[in-house]
Amino acid sequence: TFRQYYYWFKKNENTELDIKMRKGEKEFELKHRSLSSNSTMEAPGPGFRFQIDATVADLYIVSEVDRSKIIGRPTVYIIIDVFSRMITGCYVGLESPSWNGAMMVLDSMVADKVELCRKYNIQIEAEDWPCCFLPKVIIADRGELEGYGVGNLINNLNITIENTSPYRGDYKGIVERFFRTVNDRIESFLPGAIMK
């Protein structure tokens, strides 16, 4: 009967192999593999492992001099502590993702946050944003933190740089989700937001 056939079909079915054959190895690893751990398990405490990423914001910026002129979309860099989920560095610039932008966000990461906020007329106390230190490990995505300049960063500051595999944003899920959350929040009230 059909029920008997379906029973034996399901009993002998290899779901993992089916998905790999239909959708490919890359999509299986990204969307369908079983999860045995999470990012927080990789960090024994705060300040050990940071995730860094850059994205072009879904927002147009206009000129301060002439508001009818669009000057472009900003690139936003963020560094987040894996254990505590605290933002430890941020940088917004008009250049495309580059080594210089990555260095600016790393400078923001180690800066005294009270002084950093004071530059932008924001008053905070030291305990409001208590992070101005170097991590043991930085996870990046084979972009800006790969090449000749990274060797100096590793040798001089004693930081381990881990680059993820291509097209594997899930290895830096914390910072990727942060960008999505920011985009969801800004598109509702900013006039230059790009609507899908």
Image (cartoon, rainbow, N blue to C red):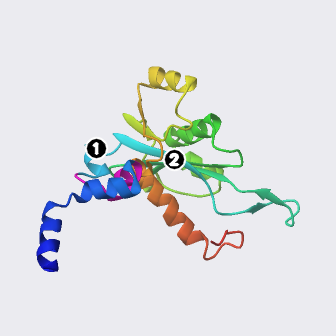
User: Answer yes or no: do the residues labelled 2 and 1 have beta carbons within 8 Å?
Assistant: no
Q: Is mark 1 on a helix, strand or loop?
A: helix
Q: Which amino acid does label 2 sit on?
A: Asp
The residue beneath circle 2 is 53
Which quadrant of the view contains residue 164? top left
Viewer-side residue, 155 vs 146: 146
Q: Can residue 34 be seen in this view?
A: no
Viewer-side residue, 33 vs 177: 33
Counting from the top left corner in percent of width and height, residue 84 is at: 34, 53
The residue beneath circle 1 is 42
Q: What residue type is labelled 1?
A: Glu
Counting from the top left corner in percent of width and height, residue 63 is at: 82, 59
Residue in the image at 65% along x and 54% along y: 120
> Bounds of the magenta span?
26-36
Label 1: few (<14), some or many (≥20) within 10 Å? few
User: Where does the C terminus fall, quadrant-wise?
Assistant: bottom right
**How many numbered marks, from 0 up?**
2
Q: Is residue 188 visible?
A: yes
Which quadrant of the view contains residue 69? bottom right
Residue in the image at 71% along x and 56% along y: 73
Residue in the image at 50% along x and 37% along y: 142
Q: Residue furthest front?
A: 1
Viewer-side residue, 58 vs 182: 58
Q: How far apart are marks 2 and 1 (CA)?
A: 18 Å
Q: Find out whether residue 193 is within the magenta segment.
A: no
Q: Main secondary structure of the magenta part?
A: helix
| First in sequence: mark 2 vs mark 1 | 1
Residue in the image at 62% along x and 40% along y: 101
Query: Compared to 110, does 13 lie above or below?
Result: below
Viewer-side residue, 17 vs 91: 17
Viewed as shown, does residue 122 lie left or right of 17? right
User: Where does the N terminus fall, quadrant-wise?
Assistant: bottom left
